[in-house]
Image: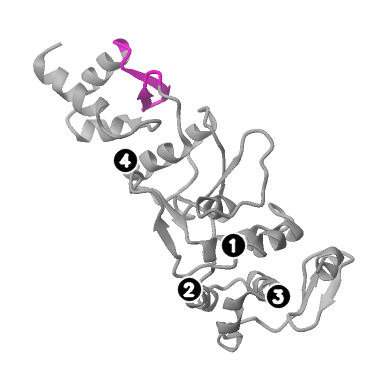
Amino acid sequence: MSVVKTNKLNQLLTKKNPGGLYFSSWLTERGYSNQLIKRYRVSGWLQTLSRGIMCRTGDKLNSFAVMNSYNEQMKKNFQIAAHSALELYGFNHYIPMGKPLLMIAHPKEQLVPQWIKKIDLDRMPRFFSTETFSEPQISTFNPELPHLKASVPEQAFLECLLLAPRQYSLMDLYYLMEQLTSLRPDVLQFILENSDNIKTKRLFLYMAEKADHHWNRFLDPSKIDLGSGKQKLVENGVYHSKYKITIPQELYDYE
């Protein structure tokens, strides 16, 4: 192998991308010819995972690194969301059995790639898309993964409520709410005012009031659109007249 090709290989393999992916289209844009990429595969430096997708041979794929690679190299905007984002900030009521779930939100126009269903990851990705938040609040949670962002805790919990009761039980989410003592009322107020999901907002305000966190005193519900009709969230539940929602008896009775 020539010195030039060796240098290009060294540049590739020393790139901080442990557990991540290399997309052939991205490599080509950076001067790696198809012939050179093939040579790396044949020589055992790179391993093919799916058509046009590779990793360093022997690497154990990391879910976060994989999504960071995908966002960076394919110019996507997938983000860690819901309870997975809350876990990053130290809130974790859920005790995973077996391989943990990784909740990932994505823009509706950016479809979930088929290849991700074929590769073996340390977490099981589960995707959802929503336009509920007109101005999503996200942040970088790891400087070594600059192209992967996560919902801030305030939005992450609202995402959990959005996915309930299909993905999460309301009782489990209330247990989680009890932990959320450090949410920022100004961020909450902004998100609630700029969200269009009535069910989620009513549930959040109900749970916040029930948990009686100090930050709830600084929210102004009069500026939040809560709609007007009744919302039946469960069968055979209890109707809460203030927020016009029917909730599980267990949640209503819990103290």
Instruction: Measuring from the top left, give residue 106's x and y in whole percent.
Output: 48, 52
Which quadrant of the figure contains the C terminus?
bottom right
- Amino acid type indicated by mark 4: Gln
Q: Residues within 10 Å of mark 4 (few under 14, many from 20)?
A: some
Is residue 37 left or right of 167 when viewed as pictured?
A: left
110 or 233: nearer the viewer: 233
Q: Residue at x 35, y 48 (%)?
A: 147
Which residue, given by chain and number where applicable, does mark 4 sit on?
Answer: 73
- Mark-to-mark CA distance, 1 and 4: 29 Å
Q: Secondary structure at mark 1?
A: helix
**Mark sitting earlier along the chain (3/1):** 1
Instruction: Measuring from the top left, give residue 129's x and y in whole percent.
Output: 54, 55
Instruction: Measuring from the top left, give residue 248's x and y in whole percent.
Output: 83, 65
Which residue, given by chain and number where applicable, does mark 2 sit on?
Answer: 187
Query: Up-down: is 45 above or below 154?
Result: above
Q: Which residues are magenta?
A: 42-58
**Mark sitting earlier along the chain (1/4):** 4
Query: Up-down: is 98 above or below 138?
Result: above
Which quadrant of the figure contains the N terminus?
top left
Is residue 151 left or right of 27 when viewed as pictured?
A: right
Q: Residue at x 59, y 53 (%)?
A: 83
Which residue, given by chain and number where applicable, does mark 3 sit on?
Answer: 206
Circles 3, 2 touching at the beta carbon (< 8 Å): no
Circles 4, 3 touching at the beta carbon (< 8 Å): no
Q: Secondary structure at mark 2?
A: helix
Query: Up-down: is 187 above or below 90?
Result: below
Which residue, given by chain and number where applicable, does mark 1 sit on?
Answer: 157
**Mark sitting earlier along the chain (4/2):** 4
- Mark-to-mark CA distance, 3 and 1: 13 Å
